Image (tube, rainbow, N blue to C red):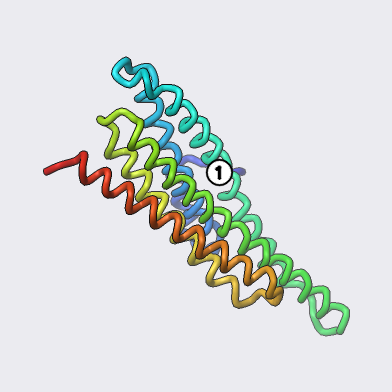
Amino acid sequence: MKFEEFKVGEFLDDLASNSPAPGGGSTAALCGALGTALVSMVSNLTIGRENYRNNWPVVEVIRSESEGLRSEFVKLMNDDTESFNAYLAAIKMPKGTAEANAARSAAIQSASVTVTEIPLRVLELASDTASLAVRALRAGNSNTASDAGCAALIAEAAGKSAAYNVRINLPGIKDEGFASEARRRMKSALSSLSKSCIEAEAIIDSVLKE
């Protein structure tokens, strides 16, 4: 069963069990999906409101982008768990002969790259989501400012959580070219994510005055 077919309680029970997957990676992707859903909600509460008619075209683009991101996050939820299970399967491959050891090592390295690439992608999409939340804050219904702000915060949590999963996997990767590029992408995405979240917080503070 795909995670999007689970009931909330079922997913939480699965997450809380003694199974290592789903774990932090799938949860990070879920957080990203929740953030994009909030951006879509802000968009839907703006489009059709006459006071924001001039913003409708911009907000329609935001809604379209947020729905595209949500679909990707849901896919990555499943991909993360499937890739980790594949990694565990590689670990359990037989060893003892030179041929078996080589096959096992190759399978582990291939799986290690995949379990690193997926959270890295979650991080990059989380950065995109935070940027989208800022755009929603600027163009969306002002009554939904707190929701757009929540979207940015959730995206930040998703991105930083995903980065932890990238960092824990990188030491086991022997492909230095991939590892180096993954580190570069991670640092770039984290920097962009931070900038968007700082911007979102500044907007929220100017709107939600005490």
Instruction: Name the residue rendered at 27%, 39% in the picture.
Output: 146
Instruction: Name the residue rendered at 39%, 57% in the picture.
Output: 194
Q: Quadrant of the C terminus?
A: top left
Q: Position of residue 57 (x, y in %)?
A: 45, 23
Q: How many marks?
A: 1
Instruction: Name the residue rendered at 47%, 30% in the picture.
Output: 63
Tell me the element at label 1.
helix
Q: For this rendering, which residue is in front, 155 or 79?
A: 155
Instruction: Name the residue rendered at 36%, 52% in the picture.
Output: 197
Q: Report if residue 73 is visible in the image.
A: yes
Q: For this rendering, which residue is in front, 130 or 13?
A: 130
Classify 163 as above or below 208: below
- In the rendered structure, the answer to whether residue 173 lies left or right of residue 198 reads right
Q: For this rendering, which residue is in front, 153 or 186?
A: 186
- In the rendered structure, the answer to whether residue 150 lies left or right of residue 106 reads left
How busy is the neighbourhood of tag 1: few (under 14 within 10 Å), some, or many (20 plus)? Answer: many
Classify 31 as above or below 117: above
The residue that mark 1 highlights is 74
Q: In the rendered structure, which amino acid carries the disc numbered 1? A: Val
Q: Position of residue 189 (x, y in %)?
A: 50, 58
Q: Position of residue 91 (x, y in %)?
A: 70, 73
Q: Quadrant of the N terminus?
A: top right
Tell which residue pokes out farthest to the right in this image.
99
Q: Position of residue 16 (x, y in %)?
A: 45, 58
Classify 148 as above or below 157: above
